[in-house]
Amino acid sequence: MQTPDASSLPPHSSSGTRAAVRRRVGSLKQRLRESRKRTRLASGTAVLATLIALVLAFQPEPAPQPIPLGKGRAGVMAVSDRGTPPTSADRPEAPAAQEPAEQTEPGGEGEASYYGDEFEGRPTASGEPFAQAALTAAHRTLPIGTRVRVTNVSSQESVVVRINDRGPFAERRVIDLSKAAAREIGMLEAGTARVRLELLRGTRA
């Protein structure tokens, strides 16, 4: 079998090969251009995102605005306190605990009188000297140290006294008050008054 020489090849085979090579080279160049374009686009997008992030990071914070009256504490600026525990000024105040009402029991009614000045300094049944300025009283049967609320029935003025003596010994009278206690319920001028007694429970001195 004989190998054909160049003269025996078709005259157009060399030019067809060159055209095919040119087409392939052109296709590769087109792909390279498209690849570069995509690379530039991706790089430009990344740079733009970085610039936006930097601009946002360096933007100044808005100036604090005063809180209008009725929506906050007067004179306090509205600043962000996210994550800050509330202070005692932010918490609503708890209602004040009310003291329990004093327990009393009726002690009767009757006429009250008060000591004369001549008893000042004399010893009482409790052993202490009598003092007109102290809120004390004498009663026939109540234990020494018992506290009694004495109310003038006509004026409704009251005073709390401590029993430290025995008396009174005049009929129809239920209690003898010191001058200071008599003044509290407005009976100094009359000398006597109809009173209501209330014993204060658990208040013996």
Image (tube, rainbow, N blue to C red):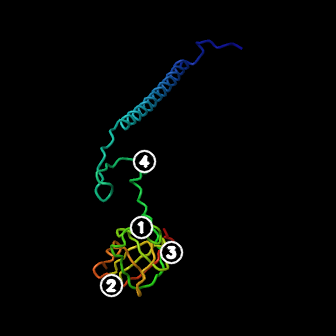
Horizontal relation, residue 45 to residue 62: left or right: right
* Closer mark to the observer between disc 3 and disc 4: 3
Position in image of residue 68 (x %, y %): 28, 55
Badge 3 density bin: few <14, some 14–19, many ≥20, Cα 10 Å: some
Q: Secondary structure at mark 2?
A: loop
Residue receiving disc 3: 143
Q: Earlier in the sequence, mark 3 or mark 4?
A: 4
Residue carrying label 2: 154
Where is residue 75? Give x, y as percent: 28, 51
**Numbered label attached to residue 129:** 1
| For discs 2 and 3, the disc positioned in front in the rendered view | 3
- Residue 112 in the image: above or below residue 74: below
Query: Around disc 1, counting alpha carbons within 10 Å, would you say few (fewer than 14), some (14 to 19), or many (20 or more)?
Result: some
Q: State the separation of the CA atoms marked 1 and 2.
A: 31 Å
Q: Which residue is mark 4?
A: 82
Q: Position of residue 164 (x, y in %)?
A: 45, 72
